Structure formats: C-alpha cells, structure tokens
Image (spheres, rainbow, N blue to C red):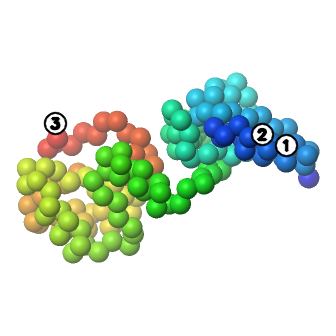
Amino acid sequence: MSTLRILVVDDDRDFADSMADVLDLHGHHVDTALSGEEAIEKFRKEHFDVTFMDVTLPGRNGVESFLDIRRIRPEAKLVLMTGHSVEDLLNVIVEAGAWLTLRKPLDTADILKMVQLIEPAGGVLIADDDTDFAENLREAMEAKQYRVCVAYRPLSICLTTTTLTCSFWT
C-alpha cells in the first residue's frame, strides 16, 4: 500500500484529530483543517491525494469549500462527510429561505399544482441537469402562461450562483 497525503477537514477538533491519528497509524501523512477557509488555503499551497471534509462547517460550508477547491485543483479527490441525515440538510435549506424541497422523481401535475401557489407576476426557475425533464417541464409551465427560466448546469453549481440573468427578472 502506498503512502497518501490526506487532509481531514472538520470543525470538531477531536473528530479531526482522531481520524488523522487512525490514518497516520496506517502509514499516511495527514494534515487537518478546522474550517473550509483553512482547507482552501492549504490547497493553495499543498497537494493532497484525498480530502475528507465535513459538510456542516462554520463560515464557508463543506459544499462551498468543495467547489472552491475543485476550482483551484480540478483533479482533487474529496469525500464529503455528514453526521446529519439528508432530511436534516433539506430542513436547513428550507430554513435558509428555500420555499420548499421536493424529492425526485417528480410528477409534472403535482409541480403545476404547486406553481399555482406562486404569485402570478413571479417567475419560475427550473434547475436540473436532466435537460429533457427540464425542457418538458418548461414547455408545460409556459403553456399555462408561467414565465420560466431553466438552468441546465448541475444543481450544486446553481446553488452557489449569486446572480442569474433571465429576461423576465431584469
């Protein structure tokens, strides 16, 4: 087995140190970071074969940090970890301002019923990497007179986009 250069990112110092100790005992060179910002700085200066990163971090969370690190080093191998259920993460998203979260597969009729609750002057953003689904939904919603904008990039990228330009939102 070869020796790997590993970064463990977790705001729980005891957890990060324990994981580092275990990996070190197995012959790997391990470094730790207690925040996403610290991990990003380490990636600017060093190379890691693999990184284990907590999703829930103070400041720059694990997903945002993951995306920044991939921009710095597109070949980076990162494993995201969480002690929360997916349901807990979805609740955090709703608490942060998402109107609702839905689980796939989605039923077009149910989506259209939900959209009826949206203010008539508002617009609808469809963010999905399945272009066929997004286009079919766009066509169905436009047929009902909704103004629609579609983002085809992977959802993780759309979640970090600060500005989205659609003709009906400008």
Q: Let me know if residue 104 appears in the view.
A: yes
Residue at 30% across / 36% down in the picture? 163
- In contact (CB < 8 Å): disc 3 and disc 2: no
- Characterize the local packing of mark 3: few (<14), some (14-19) or many (20 or more) Cα atoms within 10 angstroms: few
Q: In this view, does 34 lie to the left or right of 24?
A: left
Q: Pointer 2: residues within 10 angstroms few (<14), some, or many (20+)?
A: some
Residue kind at label 2, given as amino acid type: Asp
State how far apart marks 3 and 1 are (Cα): 53 Å
- C-alpha distance separating marks 3 and 2: 49 Å
For the residue carrying disc 1, how many other residues have a C-alpha within 10 Å: few (<14), some (14-19), or many (20+)?
Answer: some
Of marks 3 and 2, which one's residue comes earlier in the chain?
A: 2
The residue mark sitting in front, 3 or 2, is: 2
Residue 71 image position (x, y, % from top left): 55, 36
Rendered residue at 31%/50% (across/down): 98
Element assignment for label 2: helix
Judge whether 118 appears above or below 97 on screen: below
In depth, the one of 157 and 115 nearer the eye is 115
- 37 lies above or below 150: above
Q: Residue 170 carries which label?
A: 3
Q: Which residue is drawn at 74% across and 40% down?
A: 14
Q: Which of 30 and 154 is in front in this view?
A: 30
Asked if marks 3 and 1 touch (Cβ < 8 Å), the reply is: no
Helix, strand or loop for disc 1:
helix
Residue 39 left/right relative to 138: right
The part of the image, by quadrant, that contains residue 142 is bottom left
The disc placed on residue 17 is: 2
Residue pointed to by mark 1: 21
Q: In this view, does 159 lie to the left or right of 97?
A: right
Q: Residue drawn 31% across and 46% down? A: 97
Q: In which quarter of the image is the C terminus?
A: top left
* Marks 1/2: CA–CA distance: 6 Å
Give x and y (percent) for residue 75.
65, 42
